[in-house]
Amino acid sequence: MLFLQLLLLSVVLPGSFNAEVIHGYTTFRLIQISHYANESWAQTWGSGWLDELQTHGWDSESGTIIFLHTWSKGNFSNEELTDLELLIRVYLIGVTQEIHTYTKDLGFKYPFELQVTFGCELSSRESFKGFTQAAVEGSDFLSLQNTSWVPSPGGGNLAQKACDLLNQYEGIKETVESLMSKTCPRFLLGILDAGKMYLQRQVRPEAWLSSSSIVGSGRLVLVCHVSGFYPKPIWVMWMRGEQEQVDSKRDDVLPNADGTWYVRVILEVKAEDAAGLSCRVKHSSLGDQDLILYWEHSLSMNLILALIMPLILLIVLVLWCKKRWSYRYIP
Ligand SMILES: *[C@@H]1O[C@H](CO)[C@@H](O)[C@H](O)[C@H]1NC(C)=O
Ligand SMILES: *[C@@H]1O[C@H](CO)[C@@H](O)[C@H](O)[C@H]1NC(C)=O
């Protein structure tokens, strides 16, 4: 509920735009994944991310940015975006050629994967931390620290060699630093502002229960599924009355294709103990109205209906008869 209070605060204090309140979105990053197949062939995938939310793609055929949301341009002008697109295109062509050229010297062996991540993080109010890191074959290789390229601890001699090489190019370092410390924070604040409506939306979860029995053990695995909610923070727990069942096991929160989230919480119980359990869900979209699903609820619901329906019929019948009699005996 803390972020709700923060949200309120940002409404109460207009003008004090604080990106931290936008559901904890704090980081913008570009990711490059390049597959070097042989001396003459490499393929690159590029993407842009606001924390775990993909905001941009890269069309490597045409060398253009793909804007995945209407607000993915933030507040940058088309002119500035075209300049950035050109910069990325030149960088990708350059880096691919250079790596082909230095593959032997650096001791890389085809085929190999290169991963580069570049971006900035809002570390506290108005203060940003930039980062640029590269990994080869899935292991950290080097990063830009302060004003020089530094090999990662596991990068060994190869990473040292690559850093020595890179550190000779002052121009590249300056460009990367300026992008990291100036352009990226400006862009991040811009898309947080432009995407506010989308990023702050509230989507209610749906929940359902399922179970399976563990053969021969007399035990049940109860699963509470909660899906389709946004934003990500959620509380889900198996309960007995007001008692939280501490043996509940919660899986990772997983993304749905539509940008909402899914999670399941599992409880293993003796079959005879299952009655009386419920799954309780708290989420910002629900306000104070927790979502509660009762185990065997549908069964008891049918039972209630089976008892109540004849009762209702009886009442209707009595009322009807009474009405007829009262007509008959009016003098
Ligand atoms: C390089 O790899 C690509 C993709 O796997 C392949 O199509 C091409 O024939 C290879 N070229 C050489 C010279 O091995
Ligand atoms: C975009 O918004 C950011 C943050 O509010 C601001 O610093 C910047 O000047 C704005 N304009 C451009 C073109 O970046």
Image (cartoon, rainbow, N blue to C red):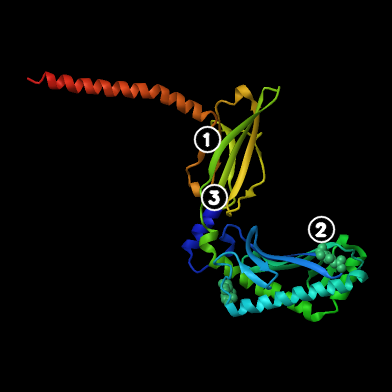
Indicate left or right for 99 with 253 as reference: right
Depth check: 128 or 197 in front? 197
Indicate left or right for 41 with 64 as reference: right
Above or below, 34 against 308 in this view is below
Cα distance in 3D space between marks 1 and 2: 43 Å
The amino acid type of the residue labelled 2 equals: Gly
Depth check: 47 or 176 in front? 47
The C terminus - image quarter:
top left
Depth check: 78 or 19 in front? 78
Q: Mark 1 sits on what residue? A: 293
Determine which quarter of the picture holds residue 327. top left
Q: Residue at x 85, y 76 (%)?
A: 167
Which marked residue is nearer to the observer: mark 1 or mark 2?
A: 2
Provide the secondary structure element on which disc 1 rests: strand
Mark 1 or mark 2: which comes first in sequence?
Answer: 2
Is the CB of mark 1 within 8 Å of ligand 2?
no
Which marked residue is nearer to the observer: mark 3 or mark 2?
A: 2
Indicate left or right for 89 with 169 as reference: left
Q: Residue at x 64, y 36 (%)?
A: 266
Cα distance in 3D space between marks 3 and 1: 22 Å
Q: Mark 3 sits on what residue? A: 1
Mark 3 or mark 2: which comes first in sequence?
Answer: 3
Determine which quarter of the picture holds residue 53. bottom right
Q: Residue at x 66, y 72 (%)?
A: 64
